[in-house]
Amino acid sequence: MQTNFSLAQLADPDVANSEQILRTCVHCGFCTATCPTYVLLGDELDSPRGRIYLIKDMLERDRPASEEVTLHVDRCLSCLSCMTTCPSCVDYMHLVDHARAHINETYRRPFADRMTRALLKAVLPYPGRFRAAVLAAFYGRPFGWLLKRFTATRRLAAMIGLAPVSLPPRSRSENPGTYPVAPGGRRGRVAILRGCAQPVLGPQINDAAIRLLNRAGVEVVLPEGEGCCGALVHHMGDADGSHAFAKRNIDAWLAEADGEGLDAILVTTSGCGTTVKDYGFMFRNDPEWAGKAARVSALARDITEYLEDLRLGPAPNPLGLTVAYHAACSLQHGQQVRGAPKTLLADAGCEIREPAESHLCCGSAGTYNMLQPEISGQLRDRKAANLAETGANVIAAGNLGCLVQIGGASDMPVIHTVELLDWAYGGPVPDGLAGLARRTDTTREVDNTLVPTP
Ligand code: SF4
Ligand code: SF4
């Protein structure tokens, strides 16, 4: 694609980077067929190619973002399906990230939109506030039908609708700590990201990961000072906010890496993993942080990538389940991790079934299901129907957002991949799967320990 930026514009490293990205697009349009918003809406401006043109025009003319550009960029899920499809390797992720930051800086959103975004930024990245908000949503539930009727409050209705009716008990893994292995039996040492929403909505996920890693001889540390990865505000265009979260995590992890050492920084929510792997890019122009951020990104791995390398061997408790595997976009498109989860589940004695349209997003996409509830709801129902068609016993995925999203529309149990693996390799039956446990050997010894060092 031909571009027309002035030398003065190209002096801005973000513009220079976007110009390089734009130049790789050859307008072929292959990406449109796999873009969820184009599939649903059929509008070229809601396709990757259409958005690329809108962003190009906005950046070239050096103009504040218009209502039209904002509308179509907001509708993008950042699912990155277009990047998997694109034959020219167009780096759409960094282009749309730049566009979102530009919109955040130059476009004044309507009042209700600003308030919704401010609320999400103030609540979601902080587990204590998020827990309180989920509890408050319980009391808002009876008014959900009313809130849905007004444009200004429909997003609030979506947030209330997504909140669970009850929260799981708190876990020790919500706090900093070290989970050691027996002396002499240590094969590795890793950190696991605790994050923000997952300790509140799904603490059992990291509990399962810690048990499984400990049993495999891997010491796990949950470092002091680490928290939200920054993805939630990053996708809302708040570059300063996301950098602040990232810096806190970089310091916390490198203190461990330079202390007792780390073989990897593991992430059990793939949406966060895509962002942590991108820290090196986010800080590429910052002389103080570039090297440190690149080190963290080099250490970051999805939990299934690391487990596959550990070669866990045959499962002592083969599950005998038929599993519909939902490939989270952040894992299959963002990180290009496709085989590891399925290989591990097969080794755990599961028959894997992949749904039709497995490349399409479930509509969760960070805060998307709260900010774009109509499109998100259509994608969720489509995904749930495709998963039900597989006839499997259970749905597995590697991203908390997908679990919540699909769980809201599916009658099948929806569970994190690592919980099934923990079960197969000596852990307890995951919550909600007690009925399916009859298929397995329930007389075996169960390792349910989760004890950090004092
Ligand atoms: S597939 Fe790639 S090169 Fe073709 S239009 Fe889409 S982004 Fe551009
Ligand atoms: S990231 Fe997803 S929604 Fe956005 S343009 Fe690409 S395929 Fe479409």
Image (cartoon, rainbow, N blue to C red):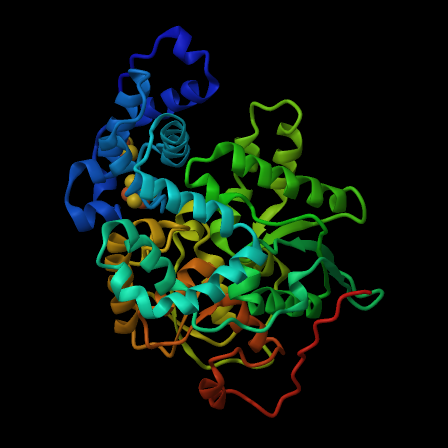
Residue drawn at x 57%, y 90% as measured from the top left = 442
Specify whether 272 is left or right of 392.
Answer: right
Quarter of the image for residue 70 reads top left
Residue 173 at least partly seen: yes
Can the viewer see residue 312? no
Taking 186 as reference, is 424 left or right?
A: left
Residue 230, percent across and down?
Answer: 53, 43
Quarter of the displayed picture in which ligand 2 can be seen: top left
What residue appears at the point 55 percent right and 58 percent down from the top-left corner?
A: 268
Q: Quadrant of residue 215?
A: bottom right
In this rendering, position of residue 189 left or right of residue 301? right
Quadrant of image for the N terminus = top left
Q: Residue furthest right?
A: 183
Considering depth in this image, is 233 or 55 the residue closer to the camera? 233
- Residue at image position (33%, 58%) is 158
- From the viewer's perspective, tell me whether residue 314 is left or right of residue 353: right
Count of numbered tags: 0
Give the vertical position of 144 relative to 192 (above or below): below
The picture places residue 166, in percent across and down from the top left corner, at 48, 73
Residue 353, horizontal then vertical, whole percent: 35, 69
